[in-house]
Image: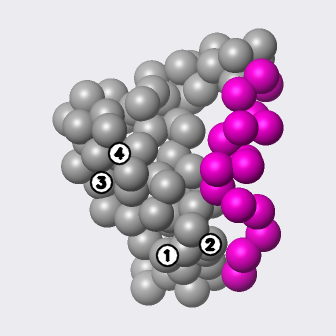
């Protein structure tokens, strides 16, 4: 499933991130705790807001977006597990 180019997504979303989403992401990240499974992780924009040391699993159905999320994790020095799968197919 490929819906959007990850670079285009981040380029288009920078303004909403700056104006509104940043505050929301900070609150969500603070409330997440130390074990996080993010469904529909996209390019990993929420990742910097999770607590340092949190165990994070990013689930994203689009392989290109998942790769972008993994790269963002590396840039932020975060160790995460990235799962390329739709949420409906997770082995839980």
Seen from the viewer's position, the closer of residues 33 and 51 is: 51
Q: Secondary structure at mark 1?
A: strand
* Mark 2 or 1, nearer chain start: 2
Residue 29 in the image: x percent, y percent?
48, 29
Location of residue 11 (image quadrant): top right
Decide if residue 67 is on the left or right side of residue 6. left
Residue 15 belongs to the span the image colors magenta: yes
* Mark 4 or 1, nearer chain start: 4
* Mark 3 or 2, nearer chain start: 2
Residue at 79% of width from left, 25% of height from top?
A: 16
Given contact means CB atoms under 8 Å apart, are the residues at marks 2 and 1 in contact? yes
Q: Secondary structure at mark 4?
A: helix
Write down the region rendered in magenta: 1-16
**Disc 2 target residue:** 62
* Mark 3 or 4, nearer chain start: 4
Residue at 71% of width from left, 61% of height from top?
A: 5
The disc at residue 80 is 3
Measure the C-alpha gap from mark 2 to mark 4: 17 Å
Seen from the viewer's position, the closer of residues 6 and 34 is: 6
Residue 85 belongs to the span the image colors magenta: no
Quadrant where the N terminus is found in the figure: bottom right
**Disc 1 target residue:** 84
The disc at residue 73 is 4
Measure the C-alpha gap from mark 3 to mark 4: 7 Å
* Mark 2 or 4, nearer chain start: 2
- Asked if one can make out residue 77 in the rendered structure from this viewpoint, the answer is yes
Label 1 crowd bin: few (<14), some (14–19), many (20+), radius 10 Å:
some
């Amino acid at each position: 499933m490929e819906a959007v180019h990850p670079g285009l997504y981040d380029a288009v979303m920078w303004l909403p991130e700056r104006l509104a989403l940043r505050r929301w992401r900070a609150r969500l990240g603070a409330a997440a705790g130390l074990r996080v499974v993010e469904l529909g992780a996209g390019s990993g924009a929420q990742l910097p807001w999770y607590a340092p040391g949190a165990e994070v699993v990013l689930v994203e159905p689009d392989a290109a977006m998942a790769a972008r999320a993994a790269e963002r994790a590396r840039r932020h020095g975060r160790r995460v597990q990235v799962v390329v799968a739709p949420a409906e197919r997770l082995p839980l």
